[in-house]
Amino acid sequence: MKTLAEVDALADRAHAGQTDKIGVPYVEHVRAVAAGLEPFGPHLAMAGLLHDVIEDTGWTADGLRAAGIPDRVVAVVEAVTHRSGTSYEEMIRRVTEDPDATLVKIADNAHNSRRDRAAALPPERRTRLAAKYRAAREVLWAAADPEHVATILRVVNPELLDELAPG
């Protein structure tokens, strides 16, 4: 079985040369997502590191398994992978069928929702994405233990903790 460090190296190679919406090396995004999942164990942290690898690189689920990635990790990555012909909203609803995938997507959403990252986007895109991510949070957070959500937010995006507070 692969170690977390080996999976990090795989993610680094898989996303080599890619940048995110604001021009930062893409691997920094998956590492931030994984950091929020580390309290839940190495399998979820691995899924965080690999959460976009099927969607955004040449890797496949079978390729990940052949590389020694545990089946459960690959299943979570598949669950959060956006499929062609599926709306974002439908994908979010599908993700909530798997508790581990839900936590991965919560961490992904939290990192994508960081104000410091959004500030680098053009205003129209920033507004559109903020609404998209807010709507997704309503569905994702309702499907997860509030303590688990808070654990992720404390690491990935503490500003969102105010949204989690009741009332």
Image: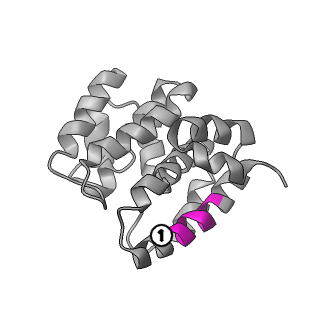
Residue 93 makes an appearance in the image = yes
Image quadrant in which the N terminus is located: top left
Residue 105: give x, y in percent of width and height.
52, 50
The reply, left or right, for residue 88 in relation to residue 49 is right
- The residue segment tinted magenta is 130-137
Q: Position of residue 114 (x, y in %)?
A: 48, 53
Q: Position of residue 148 (x, y in %)?
A: 67, 37
Label 1 neighbourhood size at 10 Å, few (<14), some (14-19), many (20+)?
A: some
Location of residue 85 (image quadrant): bottom left
Report helix, strand or loop for mark 1: helix
Tell me if residue 133 comes above or below residue 72 in the rendering: below
Residue drawn at (63%, 34%) of the image: 151
Image x and y of residue 132, in percent: 54, 70
Task: Check the image and report above or below for 90 versus 3.
Answer: below
Q: Nearer the viewer, residue 123 or 67?
A: 123
Residue 143 in view, yes or no: no
Above or below, comparing residue 113 to residue 128 in the picture: above
Question: Which residue is labeled 1 in the image?
Answer: 129
Q: Is residue 8 left or right of residue 102?
A: left
Residue 140 falls in which quadrant of the image? bottom right
Instruction: Name the kind of residue labelled 1 in the image.
Output: Leu
Q: Residue at x 85, y 55 (%)?
A: 167
- Quarter of the figure with residue 84: bottom left
